[in-house]
Image (tube, rainbow, N blue to C red):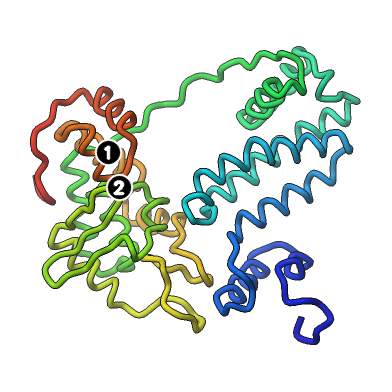
Amino acid sequence: MATGEFPVAHSTIDLLPPGPGTRYFRRLLIAAEVLPSIHVLQHELTAHVAAVAATLSPASANMVRRFYRWDLLPKLHRKYRDQGRDLSAGAFINQRGRIAVIVRFLGWMDGHGLALADLDQSSLDRYTARIKVRGPVDHFVRWATRSRLAADLAIYPTGAPNPTTTMTEEELWRATDLLLESETIELAVRVVGLLTLVYAQPLERTVGLTRDRVEVTPHRITIRFGTTPVELEESVAALVRRHLAAPPRRGYAAGESDWLFEGLSPGTHLSAAFARLRLAQHGIGARVSRETRLNLLVMRMPASVVADVIGISNLTADQRKNRAGGTWTSYPGLRP
């Protein structure tokens, strides 16, 4: 591109070997406004699907491309693109893994001379009985059946997942105190953790918060997790002020980031995996902490209020309340 042999375009970057180095280079050019902005991980996933499909027979490759275009991609668009954001790193890795399982299944069929339209129940059962991860295969077969690309095949349930373990309320407050007081944990991780522990925010959503969701005045800070802004408790707000005043973590020159928790790679936010790991290293499980706080909220507040404030659906809040088995009273601030 520097010599003019290739155009300065995303299609040129696509010629480079896929991986973190190419991804960083692309994001750097986007941040410098040399390349137009795109959702980088979504772009990479689409290219990856095309590459792995090319390893299959033409018929199976066509099935993978159709499945991705008509089933997976619309769901990803609704969850990410339509909300103005790229895939999370976790979603990118998860979807690559799911595609790999499906590609192995279709490769097995190719090796046995089976076309999807001719797949019978005994062959499907024989294959799924010998694999450890069958969820993506079940999903693919259901889609193929609905799309009339396969026979009416039965998918047998694998059993309900174990319910998520929760903490005691005392354990939750001890973890909260640690994040409020410890100076050995990165400030951004402390703030992310507190928004999870105190306000029941999923870690993946928290790291993707943008600055326009935060309103700062001399006397208070509010954040919009859902429809209604939430005024942060004073000690949490103090850490947020420190975080906002801290210099950026990035190692490159660019304008001010839109992300509340800026990542090291150009145009990205803090990795949920990194935040989860750092919290775990201090004995804090993000998922179990969030589950515990959510249970406490729905037991003490009307489900509709919880939904409005923390950004979940009314149905989810109501179902959670019924499972928690609580009635509600007014919920206090940071301390019970």
Which residue sits at x=88%, y=37%? 57
- Image quarter where the C terminus lies is top left
Image coordinates of residue 130 in percent, x first then y, are 71, 24
Of pointers 2 and 1, the one earlier in the residue sequence = 2
Which residue sits at x=68%, y=63%? 19
Which residue sits at x=30%, y=51%? 225
In the depicted structure, whether residue 137 falls above or below residue 74:
above
- Separation of disc 2 and disc 1 at Cα? 8 Å
Label 2, on which residue? Answer: 226
* Dot 2 and dot 1 residues touching (CB under 8 Å): yes
Label 1, on which residue? Answer: 307
Q: In this view, does 261 lie to the left or right of 222?
A: right
Q: Residues within 10 Å of mark 2 (few under 14, many from 20)?
A: some
Q: What residue type is labelled 2?
A: Gly
149 or 154: nearer the viewer: 149
In the depicted structure, whether residue 298 falls above or below residue 235:
above
12 or 326: nearer the viewer: 12
Which of the 4 image quadrants contains residue 332?
Answer: top left
Q: What element carries label 1?
A: helix
Q: What element carries label 2?
A: loop
Image coordinates of residue 204 in percent, x first then y, are 42, 51
Q: What residue type is labelled 1?
A: Ala
Image coordinates of residue 158 in percent, x first then y, are 55, 20
